[in-house]
Structures are given as C-alpha cells and as structure tokens.
Image (spheres, rainbow, N blue to C red):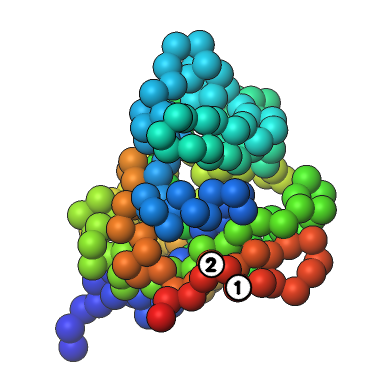
Amino acid sequence: MTRMTTAAKILARYPRLYHLTHVDNVESIREQGLLSTSALLDLFGIGGDERRAIEETNRRELVPIIHRVHGRAILRDQKPMDDKGLTRALRDGITPVEWYRLVNQHVFFWVDESRVERLLGAQAYRDDRHALVIARTAGLFERHAQNVVLSPINTGATKPMPHARGRDCFVPMDTYPYDEWLARRRGRDPVVEVAVPAAVPDLMAFAERILVVGRGEPSVELWAQP
C-alpha cells in the first residue's frame, strides 16, 4: 500500500480552507488575492514608526490604510492575542515583537469551519459582519505547496490558553508531524492553520465562494465561482 503524504492526508480530511477578513477588503482580494499584513504595508508604501506600530505591536482595533492607487484596506485587529499571554507562551528566545512580525508575514487559513464559527461568536466580534473566503485546499497545494507551512495551534491567539509556541510552529508541509499530532490529540485537529508567507496572489483561481457572515444573521453570498 502506498503511504499517504501529509498533503494527501490534509486534502482528504480538509478539502476546504477558510479565511476571515473585513467586508471592505473583498474587492481588493478579488483583484490582488490575499496579501499578508507585511505585504500590504509594502504595497502601500508604509514604513517608519507607522509600520512598526502596525507590524510589531498588538493591534487592539481595526487599522485602515490608504494608498492613492491601491485604495483602502482594513487590517484586522489582534484581540485574541496579547503581550501577557505571549510572554508566557513564547520559547526559543523569541520576543513578542518578533512574534507579531512573524505572524504578520503570513497569510492564514483555517482548515475547520467550526473555528470560524467560534470566532464569530466571541464577544469582540459577535456584533459585526465579516467576509468569509472559502477556497479549495487542492488549489492552494497545486500552486503553493513548496511554500505552505502548517501549525498545530492558532498562532494568532493566546486566549483562553497561551499554548507554547516558537518559530517551529510554522512547519513546512513535507516535514510536518501529522501522525504525531493526530495521535496526541486522539484523532482531533492534527492541523489548525495552513499558512503561506507573503501572499497568495492567485487566490481567486481556486476560491469557491465569498460570504458575508456574522451577527447571528443568515450568510449572504457576495461571489461564487462560475
């Protein structure tokens, strides 16, 4: 019997990926794909103290950025994460500033829609509407497998539990210990996040739908793959 690769195991278990963003970002995502916070700051030409405040500290609120050509983008807040929790969780000598910078350099997808639902129900987000991008896992792997990294935790959260983390939380797919995490968690959540450094500019080639969700209201379809 042929031994399944990690990619094949993920495809079998998680055929879709989920990315939550601000509704105002949908048009730019359709045009440019998904860009990490750092890539957006590069594109918008933001540097100096303004960039450091966005990229190296905890964003307690949404941050709008504006460019005369590229228009407007909304950077999501990081309320599920804080310095106190990171100080308890970080290892390998990495500092909170370095962790924020590392997280901001990636585009993230959840593999399980239930995590999206839990975030939408959290006190900080339950009164808002959000855009949810649903994409085919196979499409991402076909185009970006060499860059995909996997995480066994939610790297953007330290609440309710600041799980231990370091640079080794971002593991290339071909070396990710999938079976080890599957056994450790008794068959549940061997992967929590799929991430790509910098950007996924061709997202719309494998996206399936974009919905407006949240606030306890029915979802509204903004776009669907023809």
Say whether marks 1 and 2 touch (CB < 8 Å). yes
Circle 2 — which element? strand
Q: Nearer the viewer, residue 216 or 160?
A: 216
Q: Is residue 176 left or right of residue 189?
A: left
Q: Quadrant of the N terminus?
A: bottom left
Give the percent coordinates (x, y) of residue 83: 64, 25
Q: Residue under circle 1?
A: 221
Q: Where, by quadrant of the figure, is residue 113 drawn? A: bottom right
Q: Residues within 10 Å of mark 1 (few under 14, many from 20)?
A: few
| Above or below for 1 versus 107 | below
Inspect the image, locate mark 1, and give the three-letter code of the amino acid beneath it. Glu
Residue of label 2: 210
Instruction: Tell me which residue sits at (72%, 45%) in the image.
Output: 160
Farthest-out residue, top: 49
Q: Is residue 182 visible?
A: no
Q: Amino acid at mark 2?
A: Ile
Of pointers 1 and 2, the one earlier in the residue sequence: 2
Judging depth in this view, the residue of 72 and 169 nearest the camera is: 72
Up-down: is 27 above or below 199? below
Q: Secondary structure at mark 1?
A: strand
Q: CA distance from mark 1 to mark 2?
A: 6 Å
Q: Position of residue 215 (x, y in %)?
A: 79, 61
Mark 2 crowdedness (10 Å alpha carbons): few <14, some 14-19, many ≥20: many
Of all residues shown, which one is farthest toward the bottom? 1
- Residue at 72% across, 57% down: 129
Q: Residue furthest toward the left?
A: 2
Question: Is residue 20 in view from this perspective?
Answer: yes
As drawn, is 62 to the left or to the right of 210? right
Choose between 91 and 70: the one closer to the eye: 70
Point 50% across, 11% down: residue: 49
Compare residues 165 and 34 and report the one nearer the observer.
34
For the C terminus, the quadrant is bottom left
